[in-house]
Amino acid sequence: MGEEDGDANKKSSPGSSAPLTQAQFLSWKIQKKAEASAKKAEASRKREEDIVAGLVQMNGRELFKHQPWVFDNNLY
């Protein structure tokens, strides 16, 4: 029954006919790394803006960075 169609039912991706070269892979890897880095930088920038606006709660490191006087024991 399904034997008649043979290769007609097989799905192939557009780039699967030729093997990927090392240069193509490295180019793809650099592009993906740049995209991930840009996404991380954007998230970090947005978090900084949200902290300044008081929209999110700071963790200890961020509190020390923005309000170091909180950790000054000489005030007591």
Image: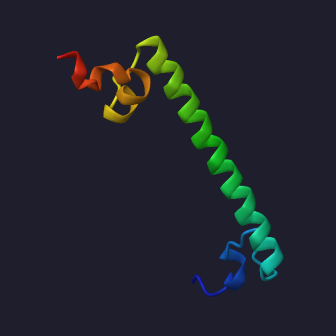
Q: In which quarter of the image is the C terminus?
A: top left
Q: Relative to 45, does residue 27 appear above or below in the rendering? A: below
Answer with the quarter of the image where residue 56 lies: top left
Residue 13 rendering spot, x and y as whole percentages: 72, 69
Q: Nearer the viewer, residue 63 or 32?
A: 63
Picture quadrant of residue 38: top right
Residue at 55% x, 26% y is 46
Q: Does residue 45 appear left or right of residue 22 in this picture?
A: left
Q: Is residue 61 above or below residue 75?
A: below
Q: Which of 5 and 44 is in front in this view?
A: 44
> At 76% from the left edge and 71% from the top edge, which residue is drawn?
26
Q: Position of residue 48 (x, y in %)?
A: 51, 25
Q: Which residue is drawn at 64% across and 48% down?
A: 37
* The quarter of the displayed image where residue 18 is located: bottom right
Check the image and report above or below for 46 versus 15: above
Residue 12 or 15: which is nearer the viewer?
15
What residue is shown at x 68% (from left), y 57% (from top)?
Answer: 32
State left or right for residue 30 relative to residue 71: right
Image quarter where the N terminus lies is bottom right
Q: Residue furthest left?
A: 76
User: Quick check: 71 left or right of 2?
Assistant: left
From the viewer's perspective, is residue 21 above or below residue 39?
A: below
Would residue 37 appear left or right of 55 to someone viewing this image?
right
Residue 25 at x, y = what percent? 75, 72
* Residue nearest the observer in this picture, 16 or 8: 16
